[in-house]
Image: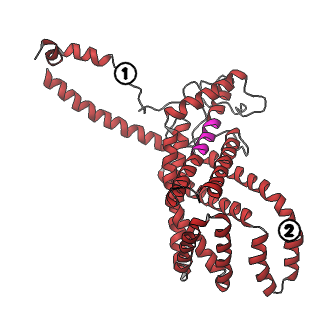
Amino acid sequence: MSALDDAPATGSKQSRKQTAQQQKIVPSTVTTLVTVESPAADVDPWARGNRLRKDSWGLVMRRVWADFFHDALMDRAAAMTYFTLMAFAPTVLAAYSIATLVFSSRRGEVEALTTQFIETYVPRSMAEEAGNIVSSIIGSTREGTFALVVSVLISLFAASAYVRAFSRTANTVYGRVEGRGTIRTWALMWAITVVLVIGAVVVLCANLLRDTVVDSVIEPVALRLGLHGTVDFFGGIFMPVWNWLRFPITVVVALALIAVWYHFAPNVRPSRFRWLTLGSVVALVTNLVVWGAFSLYIKYLAGVSIYGAFGTVMAVFMTVWLSNTMLILGIKIDAEVLRAKELQLGLHAERYIQAPPRSEFAAQQQVRAKKKLEERSGRIFAGATRGEE
């Protein structure tokens, strides 16, 4: 062995320490509490007069671009996608359980409506498989009460896991850890989940309420009950107006849901609740583009793809992942806009956004736990150092 090869093994402790000191890392976590400089009660970063200047907009765009990759936000979107897909199956089962319970006396109409939907929106090559799956689901809910309870509980649990994953991501975006206690956090995430589920049902019903649904479901039920005026109202007055109002109402409800999510999910207490933000608009518009592209794929490419059903499944995965990525992008934009507005007010937000936390209880516990681990590690290091001496 040459002297050059032997040099690292025979070098002094001092040279090894000097070599180690020349290598640097960027810590991903800190073990100290950082005090934020909360603005005075009469100072509101979101005030109308505090509009972003040109250089502030440049900072927002640069930080969004840089941190989006440094914080691995696309990886976090993939984690949210996992929880989304976990909630999909029990949600579908719950939906069909409700349908078969509500329309138990008109199961034939429900199945006919489902068949019509498949024939309209599902490619021909997949229509038979989709019909078999739907038939098996409807058949499994003939004893619908038990299936409904189980599926609703499982879907809500999976959906709340999705909301908690977004909350952790939102805290990363704002540069802090969760400060609320476990019980408080879980209770709040369950409440947000219920609100999101109700909102999603409203959006779904708003888009499914079309002339075909009125003709095949509402009209037969109303005629059997003798409600001829209801049929005339839906067919002659309500549906023509609703066809124009469907999209605006869907947009308003979606923006409201995103606003609630962005406001309550992170451990941040803004000065006031904001129904409309730049981030929520970006998230909604980009999601419309993503899901619009997916619908075009299903309509024109899914049936002719050489990958068949596998390609469609992969398209679903990609679409859900991109959708979650856009939701994270939206809250990142809102966070950086807040930082820029704080800087314009003279707050030291260069490193940390100065918005106060909702709670610091859990954060203090986490810091104490990390310090204990560091002290234990220090004792091991001290023992090794004494052994070398």
> Residue at (27%, 16%) from the top-left corner?
19
Which image quarter: residue 104?
A: bottom right
Mark 2 and mark 1: span between their CA atoms? Answer: 67 Å
Q: Nearer the viewer, residue 23 or 246?
A: 246
Q: Residue at x 84, y 58 (%)?
A: 244
**Is residue 153 found left or right of 199 in the rendered image?**
left
Identify the element where label 1 is drawn. Answer: loop
**Image quarter of residue 125:** bottom right
Span colored in magenta: 325-334
Any part of residue 44 in sight: yes
Q: Mark number for residue 238?
A: 2
Mark 2, Cα crowd under 10 Å, few <14 / some 14-19 / many 20+, is few
Amino acid residing under circle 1:
Lys
Q: Position of residue 360 (x, y in %)?
A: 51, 41
Residue 186 lies in the magenta stretch: no
Q: Amino acid at mark 2?
A: Phe
Q: In the image shown, does 147 or 384 lie closer to the viewer?
A: 147
How many C-alpha atoms fall within 10 Å of the one at disc 1: few (<14), some, or many (≥20)?
few
Query: What residue is drawn where x is 88% and y is 76%?
Result: 232
What kind of element bears circle 2?
Answer: helix
Q: Which residue is mark 1?
A: 24
Whether residue 231 sits left or right of residue 156 in the image: it is right
Q: Is residue 358 above or below residue 8?
A: below
Query: Does residue 60 appear left or right of residue 54 in this picture?
Result: left
